[in-house]
Image (tube, helix red, strand yellow):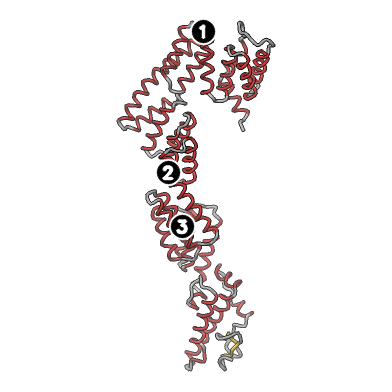
Amino acid sequence: MVSVDHVAHKILSYVPYVLVLIDLRYEGVKCGRDGSVDNHMEMGKKLLAAGQLADALSHFHAAVDGDPKNYMAYYSRATVFLAMGKSKSALPDLGKVIELKPDFTSAQLQRGNILLKQGRLDEAESDFKTVLKSYPGNKEEKEAQSQLENSDEIQRLVSQAHNSFNSRDCETAVALLDTIIETCIWDVTSREMRAECLIQMGEMGKAISDLKATSKLKSDNTQAFYKLSTIYYNLGDHEMSLNEVRECLKLDPDHKQCYSHYKQVKKLNKQIHTAEELIQEQRYEDAVSKYEAVMKTEPNVQHFRVLAKERICHALAQGQEASRAISVCSEVLQSDAENVNVLKDRAEAYIQDEQYEEAIRDYETAAKLSENDRQIKEGLEKAQRLLKQSQKRDYYKILGVKRSAQKKEIIRAYRKLAQQWHPDNFQDPEEKKKAEKKFIDIAQAKEVLTDPEMRTKFDHGEDPMDPESQQQRNFHGGFHGFQGFNPFGSGPFNFKFGFN
């Protein structure tokens, strides 16, 4: 929605020409027999003064249709077009005004100003010279003389800019073009030249700004859309690249460069979207394969390679593939050491691999780069708890299983170790005592890791088998009357008498 301030600013920019409309009384102008042209002109003038540009334009359209020789109708409509920022539409109307009333210096001066902004310097100078020859008022004479001198200076700068551009001195060319475009803000040629230099200088953001402007200033500018698409593509923005190349094909469906590029971008875009959907569905290995396909589709653009590696790192970490995740994440961090997402994913993989100190270092680095990230804070606290816990008792290590082990694997490991360390297998008092302690640890490990609630607590750094919990679960004291877990069934067994 256009703001009131914006509309007011537009109108104020053309106050001199609005005043012309108010002061002139249309002497010698023929109107329709029923006076409808006069009515439209009067209503249009009031609406223009009130800032209601679209409604004013409708009345001036009607006035032009009602009396095609009414030069003030054309001038009024041109004034509205200019207030709306539609200089292209204003030019033909100003030309018609000058054709119908050659001594109308306000129209001539206004057309010269528009031509100057468009970079059509020779045509602009012709208008300014015509104004000066027509014995204008003092104010118009000063403006025409000033703009003529300005145009002469810009002609000189344009010549220098072209020489610098042709000799590949882009820094000098850009400096000159900056000055030119300050006046010739609608000059497509100067903006295209500056965009080309900025691309060569690696100033892609500024080049994009110029190319977007030329795509609007010049009709059917397929080349601008093609260049925009390729820039976004090389920056790794496949979404914007696809949008721009589609604009090119809307203008020319048979454009060879745009169509070829479109097929490449569309394929890559689809692969990336599919990979992200697979991650959302927790099909992590499939997502890894899809991102590997992305790197094959586009092996030359570094941004896409980094993106693919970053997301593979994430998928592997989420899929509990710790060692692979650490390897891929580390590769990404070699070229992008401050990638917060990758630091978080590698930290998670380090936790899975029980490398808690490394996880803490990654989370601390990430925290410095993203201070208010809750996930980093929680991850760091978890890694610190697990480090402290690992220095005490680790139920996964007791059973010799990974943190990602399934329940069947845990029970299988427990049964094997329970047989091995059953106290009845040892006769020597010291060895029996050692076996009893080991067997208790094995039994506790099995209880914690096969109980979802207790395992979750343990995975978050809490030990469900702390001394208080042990007392509640009858795991304290010696083995007199102790009933352990039967590794071969659901019934209890007694250490003194063996398995029931």
The residue carrying mark 1 is 103
Task: Label 3: state its secondary structure.
Answer: helix
Q: Which three-letter amino acid code belongs to the residue tagged 3? A: Lys
Quarter of the rendering occupied by the C terminus:
bottom right
How many numbered marks are there? Answer: 3
The residue carrying mark 3 is 290
199 or 478, nearer to the observer: 199
Q: Which three-letter amino acid code belongs to the residue tagged 2? A: His
Give the farthest residue toward the right. Answer: 34
75 or 257, nearer to the observer: 257
The residue carrying mark 2 is 261
Q: Which three-letter amino acid code belongs to the residue tagged 1? A: Asp
Disc 2 to disc 1: CB gap under 8 Å: no
Q: Compared with residue 128, is residue 304 higher up or lower down, i.e. above or below?
A: below
Q: CA distance from mark 3 to mark 2?
A: 21 Å
Task: Label 2: state its secondary structure.
Answer: helix
Left or right: residue 449 versus residue 354 is right
Q: Compared with residue 158, is residue 29 higher up or lower down, i.e. above or below?
A: above
Circle 3 Cα neighbour tier, 10 Å, few/some/many (<14 / 14–19 / ≥20): many
4 or 435, nearer to the observer: 4
